[in-house]
Image: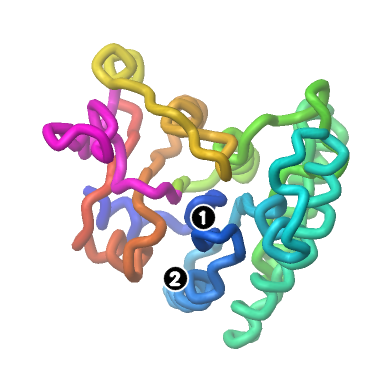
Amino acid sequence: MLSAIMNKAKKIVIKIGSNTLANEDGSINKEFLKKFSEQVNFLRDQGKEIVIVSSGARIAGVGTIGKWMRKGDIHYKQALCAIGQVELMDSYRKAFNKYDIHIGQMLLTREDLSDTNRTLNIRNTLFTLIDEGVIPIINENDTVSVAEIKIGDNDTLAALTANLWDADLLIMFSDIDGVYNKNPKEYKDAKFLEQITDIEELLKIIEIGKVNEFGTGGISTKIEAARKVNNYGIPMILTNGKKENILLSLLDGSIKATLFVSR
């Protein structure tokens, strides 16, 4: 099923979280980006179009200047994002440059996606970049976002992007293989769920765990993202982004992941 959906999909949104992008010290995992860009280049050679929704600006800021990580003040957090966004995009640029692929950055807030004119402009820019062979890399504009205009997490942003673009598939990278009925890092008897067609039933049987210090989302935000895209008829795959050649493994069906699909 996963392989069939991957092979059929032409327009794919890939969401990469901080946990996937970061090394243990918070610096950007350049080796991950090197292998990721290689896989994306392969998918593009197969005629697929890719949009990336990427977290990681704040941890990249921490990794760049090595301070302020523990400061809770919003201004320090936004300053870290301003510093880290440069490092993050430069890392993507270098990774994709090997394949002569250009990237384009789009930073959004909730207001951008709730205003008709702004949304139309976003859509036009998105389509123009893709039509010209450029890979859009989308992130929340954390340097200016406050509670009133904040989307909240990039899982939600990825779902909104998939719907806006009318994507064929959303792939959500996580640090676990997919959805379990309870946290597999804590419970050895956790049961893996390969396919989910009823999110309301899912919420009755699973236990929601905690979010670590680097991420703003968790399994709950990923489930809600799945609900958003499934309502538009778009399937979502939740998988372990750190697995070797994860995109190619999904393509040939050699790895397990959780598929959210509407009935």
Can see residue 7? yes
Answer whether residue 252 is magenta in the image.
no
Quarter containing the C terminus? top left
Res 198 label: none
Q: Is residue 45 at least partly visible in the picture?
A: no
Amino acid identity at mark 2: Leu
Give the distance between the C-alpha atoms of the residues marked 1 and 2, in whole angstroms. 10 Å
Viewer-nearest residue: 194 or 45: 194
Q: Which residue is mark 2?
A: 43
Residue at x 26%, y 57% (from the top left corner): 3
For numbered disc 2, what is the local secondary structure?
A: helix
90 vs 71: above or below: below
Q: Which residue appears at 58% of the width and 85% of the height?
A: 99
Q: Residue at x 70, y 42 (%)?
A: 70
What span is colored magenta in the figure?
A: 173-198
First in residue order: circle 1 vs circle 2: 1
* 73 left or right of 231 in image: right
* Residue 95 location (% of width, % of height): 60, 78
Q: Mark 1 sits on what residue? A: 11
Residue 249 coordinates in the image, percent (x, y)? 28, 65
| Residue 174 forms part of the magenta stretch | yes
Label 1, secondary structure: give it: strand
Q: Position of residue 69 (x, y in %)?
A: 70, 47
Q: Quadrant of residue 88?
A: bottom right
Q: Are marks 1 and 2 in contact (CB under 8 Å)?
A: no
Tell me: residue 30, above or below residue 122: below
Amino acid under label 1?
A: Lys
| In the image: residue 131, left or right of residue 209 | right
Q: Residues within 10 Å of mark 2 (few under 14, many from 20)?
A: many
Q: Nearer the viewer, residue 134 or 67?
A: 67
Q: Quadrant of residue 244?
A: bottom left
Question: Which residue is painted at 29% across and 35% down in the image?
Answer: 179
